[in-house]
Amino acid sequence: MSLLSAHNVSRFYGTKTFAGGGRERPALSKVSMTIEAGETVALLGRSGCGKSTLSRLLVGLDTPDEGDIRFRGESLRSMGRAGWQELRRTVQMVFQDPIGAVDPRATVGDIIAEPLRPLCGLVGRAARDRVHELLLTVALRADDADKLPQQLSGGQLQRVCIARALAPRPRLVILDEAVSNLDLHLQIRMLDLFAALQRDHDISFLFVTHDLRLVERICSRLLVMDGGRIAERAPVNSPLELASPEGKALANAILPALPLR
Amino acid sequence: MTAIVQSRAASVAGFWRDSGWAVRVGITVAVALVLVAVFAPAIAPYDPDAVNLTARLQGPSAAHWFGTDHLGRDILSRLIAGSRVSLGAVAITLSLILALGIVIGGTAGFIGGRTDQIIMRLTDIFLTFPTLVLALFMVGILGTGLVNVIIAIALSHWAWYARIVRGIVLSLTHRDYILAARMAGITRWRIFARHLLPATVAQLLVLATLDIGHIMLHVSGLSFLGLGVVPPTAEWGVMMSDARQFVWTEPLLMFWPGLALFVSVMAFNLVGDAVRDRLDPNVRMEHGH
């Protein structure tokens, strides 16, 4: 049974008028995909292709207009309180914009500790220890726990968000452009961290990104999205060969390491 | 947690340090007013209600700094006693307005949908009328007296706050950190209490400080019209009302309570402006905190 799956999922965004009607634009149309436990999948596509919408639907932050999201075979629509608790413990997410994803009034320690009480029942000293451990995992310092978000850089904040997602020891982490804001050195460091987590703790990742270079390092297969549909599904081999025009466009968009004349 | 406490304490000191002279004067006057109100009976040189008909309508002198009124009562003592009523009434009114605004606006913004529609249409009705007209109408229904005036002013002002609270809550609920809090598995109530309420209250306090002067004028205004505090209780509006008949012969009688009102409103507005500048996160970033 797959860990998380989407079955013919559609989502429309539109302006509803007083008369009831209104134009509706599909952000996703009839998308199906699965993620098995322990595998790392890339979800590729240009901005506006629906990949963020799909990832929000997968974790239940939004509900599909058509189709079904299933967690371990059970539909999110009919899932009870215990099921949601289990979903939150199992699947976590890192958002695209780290500055918007943290409460500006909370300290780094409070931000990372937020999931610990409701999802793991950790409080007090145990929670503090876990926060310190997580800070070290994402290459921050233990005394960063007392800082406020304004005192950190964007890259440091993104690592705080990654630490928060890792806090409840999830099985799957959805990374919505989560490493795009980091510099190349840190990107590689984070990818190595993800690879280690994948290897040692059997954590899977859904890598939502527009950057094909990130994919090759840790993903086993990829999905290319375009216009709210899945345009291509391919395994990640070296060299990576993509058949669809959308996939080729993404491959061509990678900047060379050195400028060409 | 300690870092937050420290940074708050530092920001109070920093607030004074970074403020210009006008704001410092405003803070000093506001703090002095609050102290005067708290210790009024100890400070007032005479009993504010003691009538002395032989010493009526005296000008300023060493014995009576601001003179005496038409019943020979010491004006300074009455101003000091009046600060209690004015500031107390403002404090209670503002607390009521904030509570109503947060509960009603917060419910509308957080629950949304049909509840939001119904609450906001009701709010719109209250927003249609000028606050003074609405307050007069409420006093007409509730009857006169300070308590009723406070209720009337609160009922005529909550709608502004409710609308603002709803706006803040709506703008925050779709922020990523609220989604992250949902991912952290915390309940809707805790999301409201931990993430939405502090941000909302911070912004509301600014508005409230700016409104202190306005509400003070309302209380005194309604008392001036004879609807709020009733004579002989010392209150600035009542004092001005009493002074009306002597405005041509003893203009100072009108001048002192007017000055007290003007200075307090000014002081609280200055403080409100400064607090607004201070709590704006963008400005705070520039300060490097």
Image (cartoon, rainbow, N blue to C red):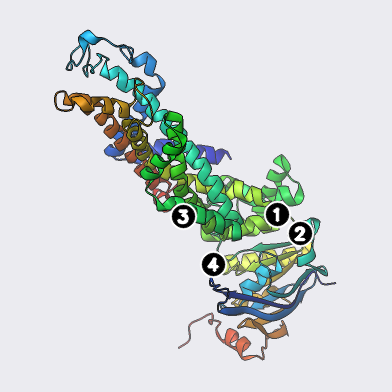
* Residue kind at label 3, given as amino acid type: Asp
Q: Position of residue B131 (x, y in %)?
A: 38, 45
Q: Position of residue A29 (x, y in %)?
A: 66, 81
**The disc label shown at residue B185, or none:** 1
- Does label 3 or label 1 sit earlier along the sequence? 3
Q: Position of residue B147 (x, y in %)?
A: 46, 30
CA–CA distance in space, label 2 to label 3:
38 Å
**The disc label shown at residue A183, or none:** 4
Q: Nearer the viewer, residue A83 or B129?
A: B129
CA–CA distance in space, label 4 to label 2:
35 Å
**The disc label shown at residue A163, or none:** none
Q: Dot 3 surroundings within 10 Å: few (below 14), some, or many (20 or more)?
A: some
Indicate the secondary structure of the residue bearing disc 4.
loop
Q: Residue at x 52, y 60 (%)?
A: A154
Residue at the spot of label 2: A84
Nearer to us of marks 3 and 1 is: 3
